[in-house]
Amino acid sequence: MNQNALEYFQSKRSRNPATSLQQKDWSAMRLMCESSTASLSSLQLRIKIKEKAHQKDYQGAISLLNQLINRQPDSAIDYNNRGLMFLKMGQYGAAMADFNEAIALNPRLDRAYNNRANCYAIQGNLIKAINDYEAALDINPYNQRVWINQGITLRELNEYELAIETLEIALIMGEQYQGRIYAERGYTYYVRGDWNCAIADYYRALSHLPKSDRYYQKVEKWLEKVLQPLKS
C-alpha cells in the first residue's frame, strides 16, 4: 500500500477524543508558529529554514518553505528545497512533484535534476537517475556532488569501470569531498574484486575524513570487512 493510500485509510478511521484534541492542539501550534514568522523577511525565513534543516526538523522547514512559496510562487529554488525536505522524510511522491515543478520553472537548475535523480535512485529507478545526472552535468559540469552520485549509481548498475572513471573525475573537481570520493571508489574496487585498490582507497578516505564524520565509521567497517579474511 503506498503512502498516500495509507494516509487516506487512516483518515477514514474513527478518532477518539484524545486523538482529536491532540490534532487540534497541533493545528493551533502550527498556526501560531506561522503567524510568528509571517512578519519575517524572505531572507530571515531562509536563515530559519537552514537552521531547521540542520536540526533535522524537516517538517518545520517545510512549513517555512510553504510561506516562501506563497510569497514567491515562481521560485524554482524554493520548490527544489522543499522537495529536498520531503525527500529526507521519505515522502518521495511529494518530493518528485516539487522537483518537477522546480525544473518546469527553471530548466537550468542543475541541483533540481540532481535531487530528482537521487529520488529516482532511492526508489530503484537507476536509468532515470542516470539520465537526470547527465542533464545536471550538461548544465553544470563542475557540480562535484553530481559526479559522485552518478558514480555511485553506475556502480549499482554494475558498471564498475564507468563508476571508477566518474569518481576519478569527481576527485579532479576539488578537495571538499575527497574523503567521500576515495571511500566510494574504494567500495567500487571492492565489489569489482580488486581488494588491494579498495584497501588503499579506504586508507586514503580515512586520512581525509574527520573522525566525527559518519563516513569515517562507515569506511572503518568497510575496511574491517576486507581485512578480516586476510587476518585469518
Image (cartoon, grey):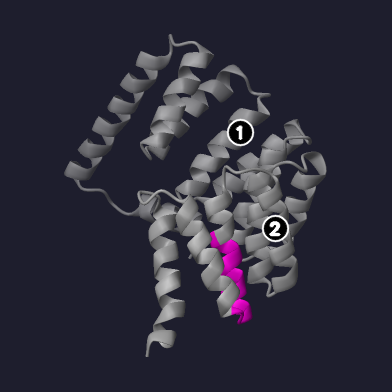
Q: Residue at x 61, y 79 (%)?
A: 194
Q: Residue at x 45, y 48 (%)?
A: 89
The residue under label 1 is which amino acid type?
Tyr
Q: Residue at x 47, y 47 (%)?
A: 88
The residue under label 2 is which amino acid type?
Glu
Most extreme residue toward the bottom is 232
Prevalent SS, magenta region: helix
**Residue position marked by numbered label 1 in the rendering:** 79
Most extreme residue toward the left is 18
In magenta, the rendered stretch is: 183-194
Judge left or right: residue 169 versus residue 145: right
The dot on residue 184 is none
**The C terminus: image quadrant:** bottom left
Judge left or right: residue 1 versus residue 26: right
> Alpha carbon of mark 2 to alpha carbon of mark 1: how far?
32 Å
Question: Is residue 33 something that shows in the picture?
Answer: yes
The dot on residue 168 is 2
Residue 64: % across, % down: 45, 26
* Whether residue 8 is situated above or below residue 197 in the rendered picture: above
Considering the numbered disc 2 on the image, is that residue within a helix, a strand or a loop?
helix
Give the image quarter of residue 100: top right
Classify mark 2: residues with Cα within 10 Å, few (<14), some (14-19) or many (20+): some
Residue 184: % across, % down: 57, 62
Of callouts 2 and 1, which one flags the residue occurring earlier in the amino acid sequence? 1
